[in-house]
Amino acid sequence: MTTPNPTRRTVVSTAGAALLIGASGLTIPARAQSLAPTPTMRGGANNYRPGAPVVERIGGGGFWTTGTVRRASDGAPLAGRRIQVWAHTTEGHERDARSHGAVLTDADGVFRIEMPQIVPAFGQPHGHLAYDTDYDDGGFETVFLRPVMARASDTSLHVEFVLRPV
């Protein structure tokens, strides 16, 4: 068996490849990026009803509001979090008590509630959602959201909450 005798070109190219890999960070394990908390949106608390009841469905249904609730920094799902949902719909205005309801997240931090079709109010089809620490265990900051839908004909709205611990 012969012992390989590397040429100068082989040594230089191998050393260059090693330097390139080291400089690119491929030798360091991947690290998760910190997940920033969701900021409260301007107008999100408009027509909020403290303590709206937890319900199976709001009104006659036909439109789905879904989402997830996770903890800031590590993105861990948060189970049992109370999310209130309300909107201007085909069955009522966002000021009406019948247009409000709350739902709890499941073990994976997912929530889902059926409600009547959202219709434009002030020219925009939008929903309102809230995580209110006053109606939970108080472990996270309150967040109000007012997501605007792309089209009034959309039949669902998906929202992500990333909560900051207090």
Image (cartoon, grey):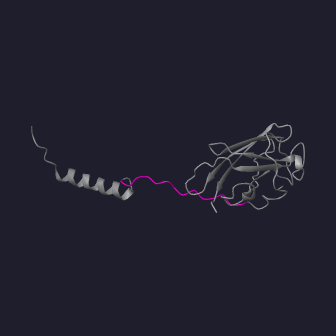
Horizontally, is 99 left or right of 9 in the view? right
Magenta extent: 27-40
Q: Nearer the viewer, residue 80 or 97?
A: 80
Name the residue furthest left. 1
**Residue 66 location in percent, x, y?**
71, 43
Q: Quadrant of the N terminus?
A: top left
Q: Left or right: where does residue 13 sit relative to residue 65?
A: left
Q: Position of residue 89 (x, y in %)?
A: 86, 45
Kindly give the residue lying farthest to the front in the view shown.
Answer: 137
Residue 137 is situated, as x and y percent measured from the top left of the image, at: 69, 55
Q: Residue at x 54, y 58 (%)?
A: 34
Horizontally, residue 80 falls left or right of residue 58, namely: left
- Residue 39 x %, y %: 68, 60
Q: Dividing the picture into quarters, in which one does residue 106 lie?
A: top right
| Main secondary structure found in the magenta portion | loop
Image quadrant where one finds the C terminus: bottom right
Asked whether residue 125 appears in the rendered view, the answer is no
Q: Is residue 150 magenta?
A: no
Can residue 34 be found in the magenta stretch? Answer: yes
Q: Tell me what residue is drawn at x 25 percent, y 55 percent.
A: 15
Say which residue appears at 85% left-offset and 53% top-offset: 123
Q: 98 or 12: which is nearer to us? A: 98
Q: Nearer the viewer, residue 89 or 24?
A: 89
How many numbered discs?
0
